[in-house]
Structures are given as structure tokens and as C-alpha cells.
């Protein structure tokens, strides 16, 4: 997988293609390697963003498209009582994710 540019160390630039569940134009979805709960997925923008909110609304919407697909697959495949989706926004928050995987990289 190629991102717009590499950030070192970025765990998502090194993701192997066989780990990717959904490859959309602006983001990918993959299982979390450190899941806090069963069926914990990550949706990661294809390009490095200091903040998702610094991109335009159309790009933000495109980044969220895989979230909808992950939701659909979980609902049809696992039939959970409910789902949670959240965002990790900023490099500092990403570091928190690496220490505390209870958060979701979106
Ligand atoms: Zn990266």
C-alpha cells in the first residue's frame, strides 16, 4: 500500500495488503492488531493528515466511507447489539492509540 508520503514511524504505511479489509479511494479499513474488544477495526486515511478536520468536507466524508462499510459487514456478519465508532485526530492522539488501543484511528 502506498500513502501520499511517509511519516516515520508510521505503522499504517507498513500495512501489508493482505491485512486490508476494505481499500477505498481515501481510506483503508483493517483489523486492529491490538484489539480491546472483539471485532475492533481501524479506518485509516490514505494520506497523512495533521487533523482530519483540516481536509475538506468532501474528503472527510470519503474517509468515513469505509466506516459505513465496516459497520454494514459487522451488522450482517456478527449481528451485535450495537457498534461504537470514534476518531483519533492528531499525532498526539495517535501516540495515545499506540499506548492505549482503546481508541480508534479513523
Ligand atoms: Zn503512514
Image: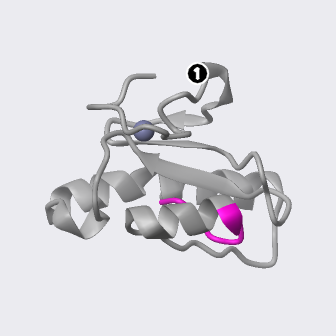
Region rendered in magenta: 99-106
Residue 57 quadrant: bottom left
Q: Residues within 10 Å of mark 1 (few under 14, many from 20)?
A: few
Residue 35 quadrant: bottom right
- The question of residue 7 being in magenta is answered with no
Majority secondary structure of magenta residues = loop
The percent coordinates of residue 2 (x first, y second) are: 38, 23
Is residue 45 placed above or below 105 in the rendered structure?
above
The percent coordinates of residue 69 (x first, y second) are: 54, 51
Left or right placement of residue 25 versus residue 70 in this view: left
Towards the viewer: 90 or 1: 90
Left or right placement of residue 25 versus residue 35 in this view: left
- The question of residue 100 being in magenta is answered with yes
The outermost residue toward the left is: 56
Residue at the disc numbered 1: 17
The percent coordinates of residue 82 (x first, y second) are: 73, 78
Amino acid at each position: 500500500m502506498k500513502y501520499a508520503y511517509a511519516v516515520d514511524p508510521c505503522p499504517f504505511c507498513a500495512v501489508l495488503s493482505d491485512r486490508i479489509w476494505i481499500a477505498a479511494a481515501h481510506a483503508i479499513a483493517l483489523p486492529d492488531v491490538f484489539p480491546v474488544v472483539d471485532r475492533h477495526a481501524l479506518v485509516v486515511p490514505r494520506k497523512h493528515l495533521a487533523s482530519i478536520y483540516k481536509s475538506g468536507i468532501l474528503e472527510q466524508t470519503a474517509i468515513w466511507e469505509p466506516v459505513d462499510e465496516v459497520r454494514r459487514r459487522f451488522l450482517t456478519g456478527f449481528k451485535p447489539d450495537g457498534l461504537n465508532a470514534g476518531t483519533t485526530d492528531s499525532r498526539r492522539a495517535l501516540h495515545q492509540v499506540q499506548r492505549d488501543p482503546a481508541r480508534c484511528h479513523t
